[in-house]
Image: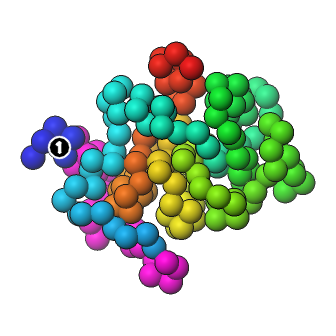
Amino acid sequence: MDLQDFELDSLLQFMAVTPSTLPRISREKPVPAQVDTDNWREHLLETPEQIKQLLENTSRIAVLGIKPDPQQPAYYVPEYAQQAGYEIVPVPVYYKDLTEMHGHKVYRKLTDIPGDIDMVNVFRRPVDIPPHVDDIIAKNPKSVWFQLGIRNDAAAERLARAGIDVVQDRCLLVELRRIGR
């Protein structure tokens, strides 16, 4: 067992998560091919090098949980990413009257977004992530980024098993500054 396996197993133990309590993948919707179950942890990105490579290979970011309040991180982090050269696709959870943010059309579900998405940047509380996992898997982005303070190991495992890279509990703005963007 390598260090990464040990860390995840330790986290799951403290969260009282067992394989039988992990959410099952719904077979009602088409699901992208699963990755080799022995290698899914390779999709959990944690090192500065992995994160730098991810950000350098990302251009289009859907922001799940974006907010219109400039004082909120769910507003100014995507704004910073846009200024750093990324295309932002707003996906607010609330604010039903909102039709545009940061100069782009608002979408209500990830699967409604035309074209490919490189990353889904998540601004949702950990307990609010599970209802979005099927939508994320159906859209099949290259990566999912849970913002600073957001960690959901069960959701991260499902996404990683679907072949999607996952970053948890890190601020996108801080990491962009760290790599000089």
Q: Secondary structure at mark 1?
A: helix
Answer with left or right where residue 23 lies relative to residue 16.
right
As drawn, which residue projects farthest toward the right? 97
What crowding class fits label 1: few (fewer than 14 Cα within 10 Å), some (14-19), or many (20 or more)? few
Which sits in the foreground, 142 or 13? 142
Q: Residue at x 34, y 45 (%)?
A: 44
* Rendered image quadrant of residue 104: top right
Q: Residue at x 27, y 50 (%)?
A: 41
Quadrant location of the C terminus? Answer: top right
Residue 47 visible somewhere in the drawing: yes
Q: Residue at x 29, y 70 (%)?
A: 20
As drawn, which residue projects farthest toward the left? 1
Q: How many marks?
A: 1
Please provide percent x and percent y for residue 12. 28, 51
Please provide percent x and percent y for residue 133. 51, 62
Q: Residue at x 35, y 39 (%)?
A: 45
Answer with left or right where residue 64 lies relative to residue 3.
right
Residue 154 visible somewhere in the drawing: no
Q: Is residue 174 above or below residue 129?
A: above
- Amino acid at pointer 1: Phe
Q: Is residue 164 magenta?
A: no
Which sits in the foreground, 161 or 8? 161
Colour mode of the rendering: rainbow
| Residue under label 1 | 6
Q: Is residue 81 above or below residue 120?
A: above
Q: Which residues are magenta?
A: 7-30
Please provide percent x and percent y for residue 151. 44, 43
Please provide percent x and percent y for residue 63. 65, 45
Q: Is residue 26 above or below residue 180?
A: below
Q: Is residue 29 magenta?
A: yes
